[in-house]
Image: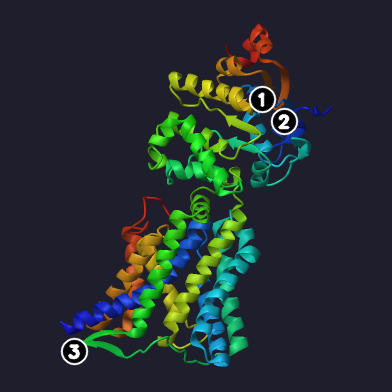
């Protein structure tokens, strides 16, 4: 049953890249202002789930509700405008543009110059590091700085739902902690709803409210983050810690 | 000395035409990774629009701006109808489609306007300018050509760098996938890119046709040289397109002036082959490789 209180509801999604589906009847419900960790081994379908929600992969079956409106099978730009910000794995800063241009780009789907410039001011207040480097080509930023830039850029559109794909990938341990703290801070300050895909299950569950475990395209467990983290058998089989 | 000045200034004037064609190719290439072989045909067709308007109204400027408007409309129309389905597919698809468009446009122009050579007026006097008795090798019309292309290129630069439309155009060129995820409606952006390319092509057509006559194939040679200019500049670089155009114009002017003018198009093709062999990404582009 659809959870009417959810910011994002995924119902019975079947999706893939031709041939055998990667996702088989996957459902998720994310309450507003929560972080849901999406966990599982490589090839479990975590990234495909995010790509399906944001419209990069068209689902064969199922519904995707953002604030009650079904966005399944719409083009990605429409889904973004419906309030879903997807930060793909490998980050996707546009290296040829400056830091500020990357940020401004994130706000272009909103109407009104004053709304956009207020969002830019907010971004620099929250991330002073970006303000110090705003005229610099984004290609000159370090990996950790790029991760912060793409998250800040996603926030420029004032999204309802943030889809984060492996934000810790390739980062130094200290940066991983910083990025996780940032995600938790966003939930606490702005009430953002986050779907967080992570290889690093331990640090994801440490900040998440709920979690789900995918295996071979099916949901094998979905519960409160603390319950999943305490399940020794689940951890040994699927989570690797 | 006088010869050298004449060849140089004359070369710069012609080079601005190549620059306009090169800019139109760069606009399309950056946005859609399509090499628009029909660009010359589009320019020819919009020049006929100007020709008809000038013939019927007697007003040069009405015809001039009608051609620019027709260029915008034709670019937008072609992108949103026949080009869009080829974007993101195998590169050969768009090559075939744009070559087909060229044949279609040239055939349609022949059917509608006939194949005979028509004279096309220039905006200003084509008599050579002089300082005292020293001939400069260029006319008022050449000065207007240079000024018009430079003004259009400058306007394009300002739009690209300082407006949100320009930011959309650049972002879509660099990374269409990321742009879509940020809610940019890239279909509209690509249509706009083609419209602007149509505008630059129309500008080149109206400016060059007084010296070539107007007929269905009148832009073919200009297109090849404009393409060469774009390759010299690097297909990704608008600034490179302008510099490449002027460089090619001056070089061909020297070659034509000192070596004989019969083989100018051959020298142009030789320059194209040379650049593709030595530095295929162009003189002013990054190290990105090219598929064409």
What's the distance in space between the residues labelled 3 and 1, CA to CA?
80 Å
Dot 2 falls on a residue whose secondary structure is loop
Q: Residues within 10 Å of mark 2 (few under 14, many from 20)?
A: many
- Does residue A67 appear to the left or right of A41 in the view shown? right
User: Is A198 above or below relative to B272?
Assistant: above
Dot 1 falls on a residue whose secondary structure is loop
Residue that badge 1 annotates: A33
Q: Are marks 1 and 2 in contact (CB under 8 Å)?
A: yes
Closer to the camera in the image, B103 or B40: B40
* Image point (73%, 27%), residue name: A28
x and y, in percent, of residue A27 in the image: 75, 28
Chain letter of mark 2 equals: A
* Image point (20%, 80%), residue name: B4
Residue that badge 2 annotates: A7
Q: Earlier in the sequence, mark 1 or mark 2?
A: 2
Discs 3 and 2 carry the same chain letter: no
User: Is A201 above or below relative to A142?
Assistant: above
Closer to the camera in the image, B48 or B65: B65
User: Is B85 above or below relative to B1?
Assistant: above
Task: Please identify the quarter of the rendering in which residue A115 is found.
Answer: top right
* Image point (32%, 74%), residue name: B249
- Does residue B227 appear to the left or right of B34 in the view shown? left
x and y, in percent, of residue B77 in the image: 62, 68
């Amino acid at each position: 049953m659809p959870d009417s209180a959810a910011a994002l509801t995924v119902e019975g999604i079947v999706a893939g890249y031709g041939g055998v589906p990667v996702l088989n009847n996957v459902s998720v419900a994310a309450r507003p202002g929560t972080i849901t960790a999406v966990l599982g081994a490589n090839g479990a379908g975590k990234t495909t789930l995010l790509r399906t929600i944001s419209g990069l992969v068209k689902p064969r079956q199922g519904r995707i509700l953002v604030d009650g409106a079904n966005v399944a099978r719409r083009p990605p730009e429409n889904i973004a405008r419906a309030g879903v910000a997807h930060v793909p794995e490998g980050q996707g800063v546009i290296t040829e543009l400056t830091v500020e241009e990357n940020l401004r780009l994130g706000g272009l789907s909103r109407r009104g110059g004053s709304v956009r410039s207020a969002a830019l001011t907010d971004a620099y207040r929250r991330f002073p590091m970006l303000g110090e480097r705003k005229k610099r080509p984004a290609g000159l930023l370090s990996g950790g700085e790029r991760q912060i830039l793409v998250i800040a850029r996603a926030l420029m559109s004032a999204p309802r739902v943030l889809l984060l794909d492996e934000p810790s990938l390739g980062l130094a341990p200290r940066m991983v902690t910083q990025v996780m703290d940032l995600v938790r801070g966003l939930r606490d300050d702005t009430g953002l709803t986050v779907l967080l895909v992570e290889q690093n299950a331990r640090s994801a569950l440490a900040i998440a409210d709920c979690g789900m475990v995918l295996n071979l395209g099916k949901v094998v467990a979905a519960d409160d983050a603390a319950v999943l983290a305490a399940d020794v058998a689940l951890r040994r089989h699927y989570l690797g810690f | 000395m006088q010869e050298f000045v004449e060849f140089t200034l004359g070369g710069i004037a012609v080079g601005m035409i190549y620059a306009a064609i090169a800019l139109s190719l760069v606009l399309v290439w950056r946005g859609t990774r399509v090499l628009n072989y029909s660009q010359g045909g589009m320019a020819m067709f919009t020049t006929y629009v100007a020709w008809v308007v000038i013939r019927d109204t007697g007003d040069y400027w009405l015809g001039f701006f009608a051609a620019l408007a027709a260029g915008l409309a034709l670019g937008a129309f072609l992108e949103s109808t026949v080009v869009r389905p080829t974007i993101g597919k195998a590169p050969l698809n768009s090559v075939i489609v744009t070559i087909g468009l060229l044949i279609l446009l040239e055939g349609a122009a022949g059917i509608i306007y006939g194949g005979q050579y028509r004279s096309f007026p220039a905006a200003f006097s084509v008599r050579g300018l002089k300082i005292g008795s020293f001939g400069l090798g260029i006319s008022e019309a050449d000065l207007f050509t240079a000024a018009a292309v430079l003004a259009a290129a400058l306007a394009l630069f300002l739009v690209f760098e300082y407006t949100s439309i320009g930011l959309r155009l650049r972002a879509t060129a660099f990374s269409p996938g990321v742009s879509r995820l940020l809610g940019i409606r890239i279909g509209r952006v690509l249509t706009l890119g083609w419209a602007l390319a149509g505008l630059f092509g129309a500008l080149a057509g109206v400016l060059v046709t007084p010296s070539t006559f107007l007929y269905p194939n009148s832009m073919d040679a200009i297109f090849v040289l404009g393409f060469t200019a774009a390759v010299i500049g690097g297909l990704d670089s608008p600034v490179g397109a302008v510099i490449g155009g002027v460089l090619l114009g001056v070089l061909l002017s020297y070659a034509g002036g000192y070596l004989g003018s019969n083989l100018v198009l051959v020298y142009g093709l030789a320059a194209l082959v040379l650049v593709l062999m030595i530095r295929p990404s162009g003189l002013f582009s990054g190290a990105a490789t090219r598929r064409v």
